[in-house]
Image (cartoon, grey):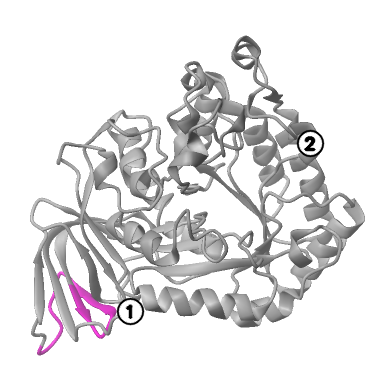
């Protein structure tokens, strides 16, 4: 990371930090990479640089719970450098990378490699999940403790199945013993295999193989039973169904130590958006019904779903230029995380403070990192954005190597102006 300025002043902005009960106009004083004071200047403070935030919103830097950077292994799709630059431009100061890289993040050497490339990129903090099982094959447990010591913030088997429930139970128990959070993408591989759309009338009309809601709920049920038995802390990522939300609701009511997230695109799109075989809307889990979408949104509003993530998956152009079922699933979505979340606020579908909390302090807490806040003494990871700037998402303006987004041409209002990481200004649009 670039060496921070010794002092930085963010002046006259509207400070918004729901996790710290901060919701008013004021100045932020930064020294040596940390927030030194709010509103009142510290003794002998002299700013090396001043950012005029008049008329702008100043929030903690965004924390993204799931972003695939494609490196190592798929550098023709994207690189750590390109995606960290895109993240900085999107106000994302910390992002979490799943373990399904090539090689898999199942040994400390891979963690060190990604850390080195992140340091060279000097644009965003990249956190990693270690593999739950060796090579993600679902057969042997990974060396979780070694991965934890290397810096992994949790463990996951990503989208790879663990066929044996006994192996899964032992993996959860090992993670619990290490004090690691298990990150689960609930999907029954055998129910979803070969599917590319929500199992329903639209998939049938289009001749596409469907993925039933039971692919999510069956996997959820198995995982929740093992969480209850092993007492491991678990996070369930990328929920897609009303039934899934209800299961998380009941599990939380029963006292299980769990959290959950949803991808931002699931709150805006439904199965109707694939009606023209739009491959940009080919995602896993699939876009489901309007009822599911409304249940997901209600889940965020009432706190059953704790966080909103980008589920960033950049692809090269050819990956989306084929018949729908033959295209690769995923959306390049770092640069639309904040705009999509704020669009829900503009539409009065989400309260402003709930929305900001879902992409700052709550995901930071899930990852166990001390960011996502404007508290005095915390790292100066900050996003400054304009809530009133009207703009349109243009493919040519995307900084990510992946241009695969169904939101190209959409009109938004909130646009990032400045991003600060550890007291360093890493992005400025002015």
Any part of residue 372 in sight: yes
> Measured along the vertical axis of the image, is residue 321 above or below residue 118?
above
**Which mark's residue is nearer the viewer, 1 or 2?**
2
Q: Is residue 202 magenta?
A: no
In which image quadrant can residue 423 be found?
Answer: bottom left
Q: Residue at x 65, y 15 (%)?
A: 207
Q: Is residue 38 magenta?
A: yes
Q: Is residue 178 left or right of residue 208?
A: right
Q: Is residue 30 left or right of residue 245?
A: left
In depth, the one of 23 and 280 nearer the eye is 280
Range of residues picked out in magenta: 29-44
Which residue matches tag 1?
A: 377
Which residue matches tag 2?
A: 218
> Measured along the vertical axis of the image, is residue 181 above or below residue 216?
below
- Find numbered disc 2 in the image and state the secondary structure of the residue it sits on: helix
* Label 1 neighbour load within 10 Å: few <14, some 14-19, many 20+: some
> Measured along the vertical axis of the image, is residue 288 above or below residue 319?
above
């Amino acid at each position: 990371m670039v060496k921070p300025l010794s002092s930085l002043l963010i002046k006259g902005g509207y400070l918004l930090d729901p996790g710290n009960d901060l919701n008013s106009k004021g100045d932020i004083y930064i020294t040596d990479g940390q927030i030194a004071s709010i509103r009142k200047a510290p003794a002998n403070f002299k700013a090396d640089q001043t950012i005029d935030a008049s008329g702008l919103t100043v929030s903690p830097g965004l924390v993204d719970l799931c972003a695939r950077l494609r490196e190592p292994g798929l550098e023709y799709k994207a690189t750590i450098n390109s995606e960290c630059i895109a993240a900085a431009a999107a106000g994302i100061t910390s992002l979490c990378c799943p373990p399904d890289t090539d090689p898999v993040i199942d040994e400390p050497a891979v963690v060190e490699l990604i850390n080195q490339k992140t340091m060279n990129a000097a644009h965003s903090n990249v956190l990693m999940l270690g593999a739950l099982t060796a090579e993600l094959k679902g057969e042997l447990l990974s060396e979780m403790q070694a991965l934890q010591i290397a810096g992994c913030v949790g463990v996951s088997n990503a989208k790879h199945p663990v066929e044996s429930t006994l192996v899964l139970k032992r993996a959860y128990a090992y993670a619990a013993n290490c004090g690691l959070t298990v990150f689960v993408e609930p999907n029954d591989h055998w129910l979803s295999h070969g599917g590319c759309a929500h199992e329903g009338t639209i998939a049938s009309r289009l001749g596409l193989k469907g993925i039933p809601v039971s692919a999510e709920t069956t996997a959820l049920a198995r995982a929740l039973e093992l969480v209850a038995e092993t007492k491991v802390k678990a996070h369930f990522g990328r929920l897609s169904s009303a039934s899934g939300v209800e299961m998380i609701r009941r599990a939380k009511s029963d006292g299980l130590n769990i959290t959950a997230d949803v991808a931002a695109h699931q709150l805006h799109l439904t199965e109707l958006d694939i009606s023209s075989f739009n491959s940009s809307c080919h995602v896993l889990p699939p876009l489901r019904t309007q009822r599911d979408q409304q249940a997901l949104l209600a889940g965020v509003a009432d706190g059953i779903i704790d966080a909103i993530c980008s589920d960033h998956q950049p692809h090269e152009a050819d990956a989306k230029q084929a018949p729908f079922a033959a295209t690769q699933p995923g959306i390049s979505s770092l640069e639309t995380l904040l705009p999509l979340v704020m669009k829900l606020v503009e539409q009065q579908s989400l309260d402003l403070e709930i929305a900001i909390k879902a992409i700052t302090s709550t995901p930071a807490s899930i990852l166990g990192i001390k960011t996502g806040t404007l508290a005095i003494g915390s790292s100066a990871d900050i996003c400054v954005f304009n809530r009133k700037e009207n703009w349109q998402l243009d493919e040519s303006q995307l900084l990510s190597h992946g241009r695969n987004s169904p939101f190209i041409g959409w009109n938004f209002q909130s646009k990032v102006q400045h991003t600060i990481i550890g007291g360093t200004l890493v992005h400025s649009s002015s």
